[in-house]
Amino acid sequence: MTRRIQEEPSVDANGDQSHPAFAVATVHTSSGTPRALFQSDLMHNNTVVLSVQTATRKRDLQRDWIHPRRELIEIEMSETQWGALVSSMSKGSGVPVTLRRSENEAFVPELPYQPRTAENRREVRETVERLLADAKAAMAALDAAEDNKAGVKERRELRNRLRSTLSNAGGNARFAIDSLAEAAESLVNQAKADIETHIMRASAAHGVEASVVFPGLELKEIDAPKQP
């Protein structure tokens, strides 16, 4: 690994010290029009914004004065994502966040609202359609063999194929539906955490206690597969 070089801070005519390593980070809450965030199935109007800027330092009145300068990056998170970020140090591959600004792009394009649960629903529907198509194809092949008075060996192989198709169908369908249920549960937990955090902050600000009762999420019935 390449060793980093050391460099002394530079000082300008006003006594401000600067260095490539000088930076400040700020965190604040933001409220506004509901907007989509990366890897969140909800629309958010209350978020957490983390910003990092370059900084200078000036010594005056026997203390250091730190001043933010150029913005390097700004990211936005849901309340749930912020909680996961501060509580998951050295765990996993990182917490999804939404990039709003960078040093090279002052305004990063907005994300469209495309909830990932829609992908789970599509995958379940396609899995069911594929399983039904495989079962129908196996049954049709067996019916054709019997109509044509195929040999015992051929019909036995076709029956085994049909049994295998039906046997695998249960496990594959169960996995797809479990994935959809897991996504739905994650959506409920995201919403619950965001609501509870928002109300706790409001309660603390006004000096009152509040409790949250979050209603359960009822999934819409999975669309029936299209008939060929």
Image (spheres, rainbow, N blue to C red):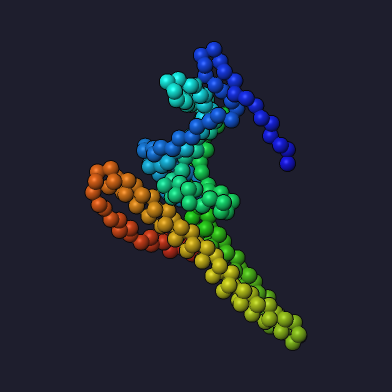
Where is the C terminus found, in terms of image quarters? bottom right
Q: Is residue 167 visible?
A: yes
Name the residue rendered at 23%, 49% in the picture: 208
| Residue located at (49% from left, 55% from top) | 117
Quadrant that contains the N terminus: top right
Query: Which of 224/148 is in front?
Result: 224
Q: Nearer the viewer, residue 181 or 21?
A: 21
Residue 228 appears anywhere in the view: no
Decide if residue 159 is on the left or right side of residue 101: right
Q: Is residue 4 above or below residue 158?
A: above
Relative to 3, does residue 67 appear above or below in the rendering? above
Quadrant of residue 205 in the image? top left
User: x, y percentage for residue 154?
Assistant: 75, 82
Q: Nearer the viewer, residue 67 or 74?
A: 67
| Above or below 228: residue 118 | above
Residue 222 in percent (x, y) is at 46, 63
